[in-house]
Image: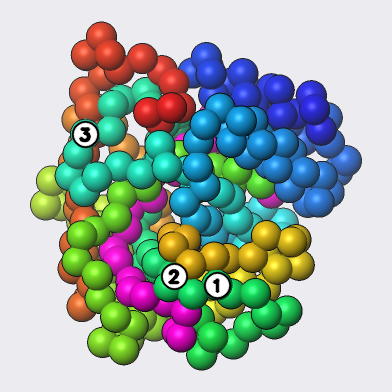
Amino acid sequence: MRTAAERLDEARRTGVPCAPVRDVLPTGDLDAAYAVQSLLTERRLAEGRRVTGWKIGLTSAAVQAQLGVDTPDFGALFDDTAIPDGADLPWGAVLQPRAEAEVALVLEHDLGHERHTVADIIRATAFALPAIEVVGSRIRDWDITAVDTIADNASSGAYVLGNRPVPLGRLDLRTAGMVLERRGEPVSTGTGAACLGHPLHAAVWLADTLVRLGHPLRAGDTVLTGALGPMTAVAPGDVLEARIDDLGSVRAAFGTGTDASDTPQETAR
């Protein structure tokens, strides 16, 4: 596990993607992969970063089947990976970036029950926001299994939140339509139902899972509930805008890669 963590951390620090880590971990052992993720999280906390919440991945049945699992996964969000709406993300800050539109929940209350209901999630949520997650892989060519992506913090890179909070009582997230555009051209579409049937179902899964692992969701946490449509590749200079029914819009912009400051390193870390 230490070997896997060091391989991924070196890729993060140097900006050079690495070989998959499944070769140094027990075959199909998701617990070992989460242990690697925890080692890397501890390193980031020791470097002065702060956990701001959690992301849920593998919420699509098709992607689960592709990676040979029947459950979502999760990773930590950090304060220095939060990018302001519309601000440029320097090219090279996230390795091998791709983007997807999601519903973000911001919590007002802790979620510490052994088993949660959708009503618990609704009661604990202060508001929802539209979000663009910029996923990235430290593993060369996205050559990943579930073990690889979990160890790699669920392929987390950066995230952008909209600025208009909306109470859940004003939303029907299951039927909410999403369109993700690149300079006005649609590149991904979907609905809330694409995320485990409903984004709140994904949040229930995460809340239960984190309680079992001893670090439950807390007031103030941001939860990225999972993609509403297919991921899209991004290129230097791209500007992406996601619109979700009744939630509004959010924009992610990417640097051109020509600035000397755009060195290959993981987000603005």
Q: Do we see residue 203 in this rendering? A: yes
Local SS, label 1: loop
Any magenta on residue 263?
Answer: no
For the residue marked with disc 3, what is the amino acid?
Answer: Asp
Local SS, label 3: strand
- Which residue is the site of mark 2? 107
CA separation, marks 3 and 1? 33 Å
In the rendered view, tell whether residue 50 sits above or below residue 140.
below
For the residue marked with disc 2, what is the amino acid?
Answer: Leu
Q: Residue furthest right?
A: 26
For the residue marked with disc 1, what is the amino acid?
Answer: Asp
Is there a contact, CB below 8 Å, between mark 1 and mark 2?
Answer: yes
> Looking at the rendering, in which quadrant would you find the C terminus?
top left
Q: Position of residue 93 (x, y in %)?
A: 38, 27
Instruction: Please tell me whether mark 3 or mark 2 is closer to you in this view.
Output: 2
Q: Position of residue 216 (x, y in %)?
A: 64, 65
Label annotation for residue 88: 3
| Quadrant of the image occupied by residue 59 | bottom right
- Which residue is the site of mark 1? 110
CA separation, marks 1 and 2? 7 Å
Residue at 24 percent of width and 45 percent of height:
84
- Mark nearer the N terminus (3 vs 2): 3
Magenta stretch bounds: 122-147
